[in-house]
Amino acid sequence: MILGLLVRYGTERYPQGTADGIDAFRRLAGGQPSELVVIDNALPAGDHGAVEPGIALRGGDNAVREFTAWDLLLAERLPHLRDDDIVVLITDALHQADADHLDAISPTALDLLSEWPTAYGHLDALPTPVVVRGLGMAQYLRSSFLALSAYALRCVLPLATVRPESLFRSPVDPMSFYDHVTPPLYRDMVADWVRGRALSSGFRYHAGRDLDERSTEDFQVKCACVIDEHLLSARLVARGFALVDLEWWTEHDVSIHHEIADPGEQLAWRARTLA
């Protein structure tokens, strides 16, 4: 069984995002038994409907955007899944920024995910490795399209481990980070990313907006989302799960019985081969 959870907030910002997410999920499922639920955080949590025949629409929890939405539905659905079932976490922003990697989505990854401790998606890297909450972070899987087993999810719930109130001293001061929560270098990187400033790597966040263009609440929630995205991969790695880049997997066509390359090696291969 493959369960997809696609989060959106209405359809105004990404009009094509729901259709893109449905298409990506179906390509990964490859015709195997599957179910996709669209969670709309613009709707109350108790709302039920349908996006199209066979695809349910549910209201969500927008407190920490996609992470609390996923937690809400996983609390309901995860107890009914076997450990080797697959869950695909998707957002309607999956086609923003560089999206060519989505062409490499392959159902060959399903056996890998169900049989081996792995998580599958688009690998990215922090400009500088950091340690947050005792976890080292250098590479991570983007949360816009991330597949893993139900067992892996059970090991790392809840997904919304960081919330604005645990990051900031004041809800009216956007930069009031608690000093003990995040190292200064990482804190500055997260804030610059959310504000749309170029990082040392030269990349900018496609949806970045500066403090005069967004509310303090929106800024603080988005910072929490970014850190939750990074910590999800860090917590998976700490529990012994390997991060697998979908382009690396598809191009190598490796046997699941072979060793998965280190995330840094996968990114180095991608830089050499696909740049």
Image (cartoon, rainbow, N blue to C red):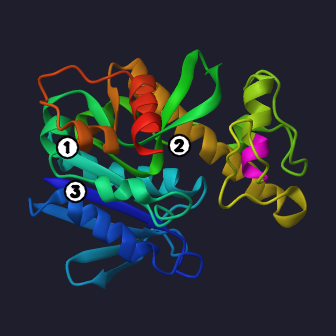
Q: Amino acid at mark 2?
A: Ala
Q: Amino acid at mark 1?
A: Ala
Q: Which residue is mark 2?
A: 160
Q: Nearer the viewer, residue 250 or 48?
A: 250
Estimate the spatial distance between the alpha carbons at disc 2 and disc 1, rounded to whole Å. 26 Å
Q: Amino acid at mark 3?
A: Leu
Q: Measuring from the top left, give residue 151's x and y in whole percent.
A: 24, 34
- Depth check, mark 2 against mark 3: the one in front is 3
Specify whether residue 106 is painted magenta. Answer: no
Q: Are marks 1 and 3 in contact (CB under 8 Å)?
A: yes
Vertical side of 177 occupied by 109: above or below = below
Q: Earlier in the sequence, mark 2 or mark 3?
A: 3
Question: At numbered mark 2, what does the secondary structure look like: helix, strand or loop?
Answer: loop
**15 with respect to 110 (left or right):** right
> Which region is colored magenta?
191-195
For label 1, the crowd category at 10 Å Cα-Cα, with few meaning under 14, some 14 to 19 and many 20 or more, is: many
Q: Nearer the viewer, residue 48 or 85?
A: 85
* Residue drawn at x 32%, y 25% as measured from the top left: 241
Give the quadrant of residue 191: top right
* Residue drawn at x 51%, y 73% as measured from the top left: 44
- Depth check, mark 2 against mark 1: the one in front is 1
**162 with respect to 101 (left or right):** right
Q: Which residue is mark 1?
A: 109
Question: At numbered mark 1, what does the secondary structure look like: helix, strand or loop?
Answer: helix
Name the residue at the top extreme.
Answer: 134
Q: Which residue is mark 3?
A: 28
Q: Please, what is the dominant secondary structure of the magenta stretch?
A: helix
Give the quadrant of residue 19: bottom left
